[in-house]
Image (cartoon, rainbow, N blue to C red):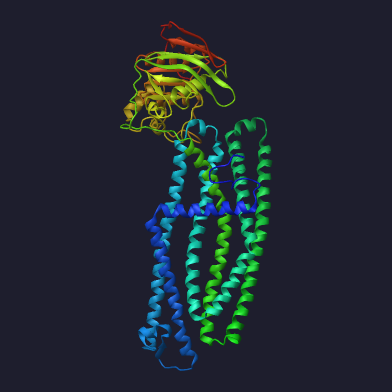
Amino acid sequence: MRRNAAGAAMANALPSANKATDTAKLCVTLARFIFMTAPRRFFLTAGLLLIGGLTESLSLVMLLPFLHFMGGGNHSTHLSIPTGFLSSIFGPTVETELWVALAVVATVIISSALITRARMLTMSRLLLDTLNKLRMDLFRSIASTRWTTFSKMRVADLDHVLTGDIDRVQQSAVSIFMLFQNGVFLIIYTVLSCILSLKMTAFAVVMGFIVFLIQAPIRKMSAEFGDKLTRERQTQYRTINDFLLGLKVTKSYNAEQRYVHELGAILERMKADALKYSGFTSLSNIIFQSATAVVACVFIYASYAVYKLDVARIVLLLIIFMRLAPRFSDIQTQLHSLFVSIQALSAMQKVVTECEANKEEARVAGDEGFIHFKLKDKLSFSHVRFSYGNGDVLKDVSFDVPANKVTAVIGPSGGGKSTIADLAMGFITPQTGHIAVDGSRLDGTTSRAWRDYTAYVPQDTYLLPASIADNLRIARPTATAQDIRKALLLAQAEFVYRFPKGIDTIVGDGAQKLSGGERQRIAVARALLKKPDLLILDEATSALDANNTDWIVDMLTKLSKKVTILLITHNPAVLRCAHRVITVQDGTVAEMKDVKRRNKKPKRKSENR
C-alpha cells in the first residue's frame, strides 16, 4: 500500500502505539490548521470561552451565601455575606439586601447567556472558515496537479474525498471545538472546587483520571473503526460510481445484480463493524454512569462524615460535581467521535500530498521565462520518447506540424496517436527529446501558458448539465451571443437555433437529448470560440456520418487558412483536407508525406440527428 507524508495511518496492520501516535498527529494537525485559518478569531473564541466559564462559575459561587442564609432559618431580607479569602479587600463581610444580591445573580446569568451566544457565533464562523479553506485547498490541489498524476487517480476516490471525507473532517473539527470548550469549563470548575475543598477536589480528579484510563481501549477501537470506515466508504463510492457510469453496458449484459450483491456485501460489513463499535461505546457509557454513581456516593459520605463540611458547601460541591460529570462524559463522547472521524483527514492528506508533489508549475506574464506563444511557423516534435511506465509508447518520434495547415496523424489503435495529442497540448512532457513552438520549448513551466493558445476536441465529448451557451463559454467566458453564433455556424451546429430556447437550451445529463454528432459539433464550436492558434481534434469526427463528414472536411479546409490543425483520426474520408499525413505505428513514425487535397466542394445536405 502506498503511504503519504502524513504517516501510515491508512495501513491495515500497524502496532497500536503507531496507530495512537498517528491519530494524535492528525488531531494536532487539524487543531493547528484551525488556529492558522483565523488566529484572531481563535483567540477571540478562547477569550469568550474563558469569560463564559468564569461568569458561569461566579453564578454558582454566589449561591453559597444564599445557602448559608436560608439554612439558618432566618427570613430577614438583609444579608451579611462572608468574603472569605477576599476579606483583605472587602473586609470580613459584605452587607447587602436580598433583592440586590438576586439582581446581581440575575445579571451574571444573563451576561453568561449573552457571552455564550457570542461564543457560539464566533465559533461557528471559525468552523465554517476552516472547512471552506480545507475544501478549497483540497480542490485547488487537485485542480493544479499534472494531468499524468490526475489520470492515475480514480474519480470515485476523489469524489469521496471531496464530499464524504470532508464531512467527516467537519465532524472532527466540531469535536475539537467541543473538547476545547469542555476542557476550559473543566479547568474552571476544578479551580472553583479547589477553593471550596481541596481534598474533595483531589479525590474527584483522581477518580476521573482512573475512569479516563479505563476507557483507553475504547478510544483505540474508535481509531481502528474510523480507519475501517474510511476504506469501506471508499469501496462503496467506487462500486456506486462504476455502476452509474457503466449502467447502459451493465444492463445490456443483465449484470445489475452483481453490483447489487457487491454493494449489499459492503453495507453488511459496515453494519457489522458499526454494531461492534456501538456495543463497545455503550459499554463505555455503562462504565461511566456506574463510576459516576459510585463516586458521587463516596463523595457525599466523605465530605459529610470524614471531612465534616457544612451542608451548604456540600450542596455547592455537588452542584459543581453534577456540572462536571456531563462535561466529562461529553469529553469521552467527543474523543470517540474524533478518533473515528479524524481518519478521513489522513485520506485528504494523501491526496493533497500527492497532488502538491506533482503540481503543474504555471508562469504568468511578468515572470522570468514566461513565453507569449504565437504559432507562426511550426510545432515540432524532436526525438520524442514517452512512456507511462510500462514500456515506451513513443520512440524517437520527430515531425513538424506546419502552421496554418491540416496535419493528420493516422495509424492502428495503440500506436501512440492520442499520446501525441496530449503532448501537443502540454498535458504531458516527454522523457527525452522535446516539443517546440516556433523554437520555444514546451516543458513543465510553459505548458500551461501554451494551452491558452490551443483548443482540444476529444472523441468522448463531455457537456455540462447547463445551457449550450454556458458550455461554449467554458472556452471563452467573455464571448457575446454574436461570438457564439459565429462559432456555431462555423462548426455547422446551427441546429441549436431550432430548439425553442436556442443557445439557452439546457443540455447534459437528464436534459435535452443530443445525438453523438450534435454533441461533437457543439464541442467543435466551443473550441473555435476560443480562436486558438492550434486546434487538436482527437477522433472528433468518429460520430459523424458520411454527409456530415463532408462538411467537416470543408470546415477544416477553410479554418486551415488561419488556424493550425492537428487531426488524429481513423477516418480516411477526412484526409481529403490534410496537407500532411503522418502514419504512427508501434510508437514510431512509419511514414510522413505531404498530400494534395481534393478541391471538390461538397454539396450542402440536411443534417441527420
Q: Is residue 603 above or below residue 83?
A: above
Instruction: Examine the rendering and report whether any part of residue 265 can be seen.
Output: yes
Q: Is residue 108 above or below residue 422?
A: below
Task: Specify the quadrant of the image occupied by residue 123.
Answer: bottom left
Q: Position of residue 109 (x, y in %)?
A: 41, 75
Q: Is residue 24 left or right of residue 496?
A: right
Q: Is residue 320 left or right of residue 132?
A: right
Task: Specify the quadrant of the image occupied by residue 294.
Answer: bottom right
- Residue toward you, 542 or 432: 432
- Residue toward you, 4 or 103: 4
Q: Is residue 599 above or below residue 530?
A: above
Q: Is residue 583 left or right of residue 379?
A: right
The residue at the point 40 percent across, 79 percent down is: 105
Position of the N terminus, as image quadrant, is: top right
Q: Position of residue 274 (x, y in %)?
A: 65, 54
The residue at the point 49 percent across, 42 percent down is: 352
Residue situated furthest left in the rendering: 366
The residue at the point 49 percent across, 27 percent down is: 461
Q: Position of residue 20 (x, y in %)?
A: 60, 54
The residue at the point 39 percent across, 85 percent down is: 87
Q: Position of residue 435 (x, y in %)?
A: 43, 20
Instruction: Examine the rendering and report whether any part of residue 605 can be seen.
Output: no
State how many labels appear.
0
